[in-house]
Image (spheres, rainbow, N blue to C red):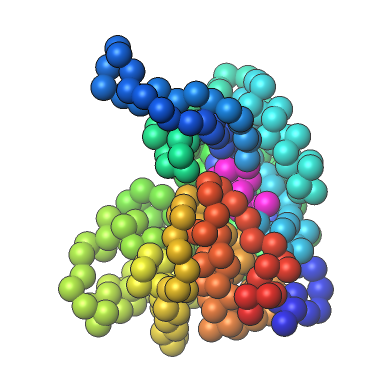
């Protein structure tokens, strides 16, 4: 089955980008200096993270993927630019010389993550205003807009971005962060995971209570749909009708970046004309594939077609 039967959808992805670095090695002893393992690093990998991983997933599925974000004037920012070019992603990275590009360094020993170190700085207001102007010029050429919020400050003007995109009649998909969701008002769909949703609506004791809370949140935020990813419970989309997909029966190796795969696949399917039920079915299968891979990873069009 071809998941993109008619045309190559054009996605505009905006949000917080980061460089994911991996140090892989062997652990054979405990340090004499402290009760911690000593890892002998054997090889390094660099991958696209955050909104850049969303754009990469969309491109891997065959979409024309455009990325708009902010990086620092540093080696990590230049590495991101190179990786995006290699991934055939049309990237417009605004450079802010006052910040450091966000980097997540993961140390892996025997296929287990031992440590993660984060480096990050909030972008300046002037650079973000320039990015907003660039956003407006690119929206008209896109089929779908994806706003990937990692809480790093790159989406300060997200409410205005949603307003602009909706004025152009473009679907807007938001991957939310934090507990202040009023700024997402008017989006087409937001895609929180279970923990993120609980921060905003509180706990629930049954699927019926979850549905009540989801309907209220949809109304409060003016959403067409709310997609909740629920780990081992699969994912549920609350729209005019409710659609549930059970989790795929696969071995879970690493969940990092799975949300990026879900929203990218959902966006590609919506842009290709799929309805909600089909879009989340395919997104659920894509998520099941990517959690079987180590680190931030992508699902290729061929992998997804074979799974379908």
Residue drawn where x is 42% and y is 78% of the image: 246
For residue 52, above or below residue 10: above
**Is residue 167 or residue 44 the one in the foreground?**
44
One can see residue 64 in this view: yes
Prevailing SS of the magenta stretch: helix
For residue 74, above or below residue 250: above
One can see residue 158 in this view: no
What is the count of numbered marks? 0
Residue 137 colored magenta? no
Q: Looking at the image, which residue sits at the far top?
A: 33
User: Residue 49 placed where, x, y %?
Assistant: 57, 43
Residue drawn where x is 40% and y is 23% of the image: 38
User: Residue 130 placed where, x, y %?
Assistant: 66, 36
- Screen quadrant of the N terminus: bottom right
Residue 49 colored magenta? yes
Residue drawn where x is 46% and y is 39% of the image: 110
Residue drawn where x is 30% and y is 79% of the image: 211
Q: Quadrant of residue 47?
A: top right
Q: Looking at the image, which residue sits at the far bottom?
A: 241
User: Is residue 191 toward the left or the right of residue 289 in the image?
Assistant: left
User: Residue 245 placed where, x, y %?
Assistant: 45, 79
- Screen quadrant of the C terminus: bottom right
**Is residue 287 or residue 145 the one in the foreground?**
287
Q: Looking at the image, which residue sits at the far front?
A: 28
**Is residue 278 or residue 250 the one in the foreground?**
250
User: Residue 86 placed where, x, y %?
Assistant: 79, 42
- What is the magenta range? 48-56
């Amino acid at each position: 089955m071809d998941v993109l039967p008619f045309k190559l959808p054009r996605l505009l992805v905006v949000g917080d980008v980061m460089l994911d670095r991996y140090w892989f090695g062997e652990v054979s002893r405990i340090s004499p200096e402290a009760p911690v393992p000593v890892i002998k690093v054997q090889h390094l990998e660099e991958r696209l993270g955050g909104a850049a991983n969303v754009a990469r997933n969309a491109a891997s599925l065959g979409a024309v993927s455009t990325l708009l974000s902010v990086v620092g004037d540093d080696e990590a920012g230049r590495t991101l630019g190179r990786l995006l070019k290699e991934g055939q992603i049309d990237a417009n990275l605004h450079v802010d010389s006052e910040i450091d590009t966000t980097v997540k360094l993961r140390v892996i020993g025997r296929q287990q993550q031992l440590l993660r170190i984060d480096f990050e700085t909030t972008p300046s207001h002037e650079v973000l205003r320039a990015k907003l102007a660039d956003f407006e010029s690119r929206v008209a050429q896109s089929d779908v807009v994806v706003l990937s919020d990692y809480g790093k400050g790159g989406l300060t003007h997200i409410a205005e971005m949603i307003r602009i995109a909706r004025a152009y009649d473009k679907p807007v998909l938001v991957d939310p962060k934090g507990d202040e969701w009023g700024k997402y008002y008017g989006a087409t769909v937001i895609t929180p995971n279970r923990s993120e949703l609980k921060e905003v609506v509180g706990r629930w004791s049954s699927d019926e209570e979850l549905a009540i809370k989801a309907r209220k949140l949809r109304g409060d935020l003016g959403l067409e749909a709310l997609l909740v990813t629920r780990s081992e419970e699969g994912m549920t989309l609350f729209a005019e009708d409710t659609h549930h997909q059970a989790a795929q029966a696969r071995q879970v190796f690493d969940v990092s970046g799975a949300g990026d795969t879900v929203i990218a696949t959902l966006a590609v399917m919506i842009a290709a004309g799929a309805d909600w039920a089909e879009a989340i079915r395919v997104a659920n299968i894509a998520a099941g594939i990517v959690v079987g891979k180590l680190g931030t990873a992508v699902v290729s069009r061929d992998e997804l077609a074979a799974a379908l």
